[in-house]
Amino acid sequence: MSIPQEHDYIGLSEPLSSEKISYKMAAAAAEGVTPSLNVEKIGVFNLKETELRLGLPGSEAPDRKGGIGIGVSLFGKELKGESMCVKSFVSGAKRGFSDAINGAGKWGLSINGGSAAGLGENGGSNVKEEIPALKPVEERKNGASITAPASKAQVVGWPPIRSFRKNTLATNTPKKDDAAGKPGPGCLYVKVSMDGAPYLRKIDLKTYCSYPEISAALEKMFSCFTIGQCGQGLAAKEHLSESHLMDLLHGSEYVLTYEDKDGDWMLVGDVPWEMFTDSCRRLRIMKGADAIGLAPRTMQKCKSQN
Amino acid sequence: MDRSKLFIGNCYAVSPEIVARRFRRIKSVTLKGKPRFSDFNMLPLDWGANVHSWLVMFAKVYPFLEELRLKRMTISDESLELLAKSFPGFKALSLSSCDGFTEIGLKAIASHCRNLTELNIQDSITEEVGGGWLSSFPENFASLQVLNFSSLNGDLNFDDLEKLVSRCKLLRVLKVNDSITLDQLQRLLVHVPRLTELGTGSFLQELTPRQYEEIETAFCNCRNLQVLSGLWEATSLYLPLLYGACASLTFLNLSDVPLHSGEFAKLLAHCPNLRCLWVIDSVEDKGLEAVGLSCPLLEELRVYPADPYDRHHRDGVTELGFLAVSRGCPKLHYVLYFCRRMTNAAVVTIVQNCPDFTHFRLCIMTPCQPDYLTNGPMDEAFGAVVKTCTKIKRLSVSGLLTDQTFEYIGQYAKDLETLSVAFAGSSDWGMQCILEGCPKLRKLEIRDCPFGDSALLSGREKYEMMRSLWMSSCSVTMKGCRLLAREFPRLNVEVIREEGGDEDQAHKVYVYRSVAGPRRDAPPFVLTL
């Protein structure tokens, strides 16, 4: 199954360019659907992608919440460079998440803390009570306090926390380690849970290059459970309208979602692959019916951003 | 010499050959490898500390080897196989912060070590380790007393685990990884009610009321539990399952589960005998107040940051939480505290409340952060620590610090053995104070401080009496390092080269005493001067 390049950038390996952002925003505006939370996030992420560094006090870095992050390398590997793999997409005959992912469009799905999606009853200590406000992107300054060493580009290894601590609010995200300069076997393990399945699985996001690949792999992994057919005819749609969303969710038995670094639950497929692997903390294969309850909120969010 | 236990604090301080000549009948070996900063990605991979050459020697000379304990070393599958096949009486393998192996090596251990009593893997990096190794224990194998695979990734065949656990009647320590669910845990607990240390798996699962009850009962039956850890993703809904097992708990490790203050306080109320508590700062100052109220016997507290890289530092704990603990826990002597703000006044009060600190590791997470009330340096805080806590052995300093801090340390901390310094000091004088003032200093690790060659060389007489010195991103030059190396042949002065860095600067310096001479296995980026 090929993904029409000009319609969306899912699966492409180039970093997101500002050109593409404005194209999307323009197109979205033309369609009357505000790109909302996501595109602004994309803007933020884009800057972050190019700045893998933490400044010292006095120098400000773009705001970044959560995640083992900038300047800290798990294994000295440069994420961007390494993931430019040119694997062919899994052209699975079986429909499953692939369609959902292709057709997902550019909206994000945010789940609140007492949501009907089953998170509420678990207390969800990782889920915030309100939709977090977007943080503004700050320009980097190069001032340094008097006693700090001359402004350094990054602070590797600070604070002194073991990088592989399972700290549950962060994923193991390998970043470039300038000091080491050596690549290593980085990994990006995230948990995958499926509603109704009695166990969790863990996958290494780094072993996949695209959404169709990961969806095929997950289908295989959880194939012993019922996976229904996803909605049809959405591959060609670029922007999501309410009716499309409903179609998607009504048509599919399961929907693939992920929790990002801010604790928001999003539908898999609406940001560039790299951004997804960057921000994905864990995956959840959710019953479509549960996700439906979120849809009105999502659409409202889209509209209110206008 | 006729002892049977060998402890080697730095694997490069001595060589396998020298050890083999010197010691004849060794049954237990502890080996430590990489400098501690390797935990924080400050050392390139393949820096070294590979245990293989040691094992080759041990296989020849110590056939009766029973125990191997490694910390921060690399151990390959090949090494594990060698280990498994060379020592028929082998009993205990402990790997702490190690790397280099996969399930293949573990399979070898499981298959061949018939007398294994301990398999203890902690904080170790592996690729996804499949669960097949666990199924490699022979059918009649039943000698395991300690099984810890909590930090291994990968799913297991649960049936094999259950069978193993049910056979090993002497099992007293069981720490599983987070692929094990709650109801699976219950099935395990049924077999080992006499467990003294438990690391649970994932604590998040939709349970039927019956399952909930069964799990609750299983925990109630664990009357001997002293140590509890794991609890991944536990929330207020599931924590009560534990209450029945907490009466005799002395060590509660919540460093893998970020809790809120409310649920944390409720849990603490059931743990009256806690001596050691590790927690994430999501519990906030309020949670630490509960510690002060509920844990009068507390001796050790570690507070880890939920979000270490959050630039805005809104959440977490402050000086208030630490103060609250110090008021309620007079026996506190070990603290590791990650916080976003601190004041001199608070620390002064804290050490007055708890004068018995032996380990004081304070990490104010923004480098060079001043006292947030006075906006001045944090010198007086650490001054108070070393003046009041006469038994201080280990110190980690942070915040805005001038040379005054180091003057205090050199003057008062006469029992100090380990010192960690980052983003601190004003001049070479600071480091000199330490090197000249602390007679028992063994390990000194410094990063991002304005200490140069003069400081480095001021300690030249001392380094042979220490285990090691680490200096990175300071102002040391190659020239200074060469001077030191030339004058002291029994010191290994190693410089780790940075790509594209200034050729004259010594970015990462590792100095340690050694009778083995320069490393023979040094990778190209490690220069021994």
Image: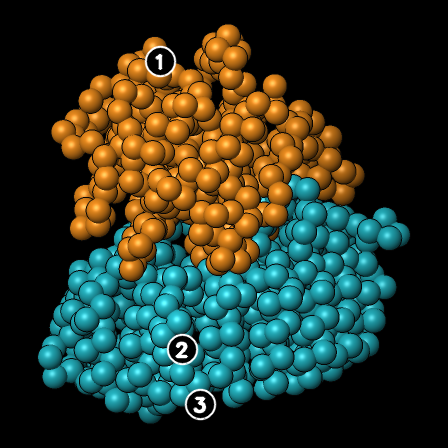
Instruction: Determine the secondary structure under disc 3.
Output: loop
Q: How did the renderer colour the structure?
A: by chain
Answer yes or no: is residue B419 visible: no
- The span from disc 3 to disc 2 (Cα, nearest Å) is 17 Å
Q: Residue at x 30, y 58 (%)?
A: A199
Amino acid marked by disc 3: Arg
Q: Residue B161: x percent and y percent?
A: 23, 72
- The span from disc 2 to disc 1 (Cα, nearest Å) is 53 Å
Q: Residue at x 75, y 54 (%)?
A: B341
Q: Residues within 10 Å of mark 2 (few under 14, many from 20)?
A: few
Dots 2 and 1: beta carbons under 8 Å? no
Answer yes or no: is residue B208 visible: yes
Q: Residues within 10 Å of mark 3 (few under 14, many from 20)?
A: some
Q: Earlier in the sequence, mark 3 or mark 2?
A: 2
Q: Residue at x 39, y 29 (%)?
A: A246
Location of the N terminus of chain B (image quadrant) = bottom left
> Which chain comes out orange in the rendered image?
A
User: Which residue matches tag 2?
Assistant: B213
Instruction: Determine the secondary structure under disc 1.
Output: loop
User: Farthest left residue?
Assistant: B139
> Which chain comes out cyan in the rendered image?
B
Q: What chain does mark 1 sit on? A: A
User: Which residue matches tag 3?
Assistant: B223
User: Which residue matches tag 1?
Assistant: A7
In which image quadrant can residue B345 be found? bottom right
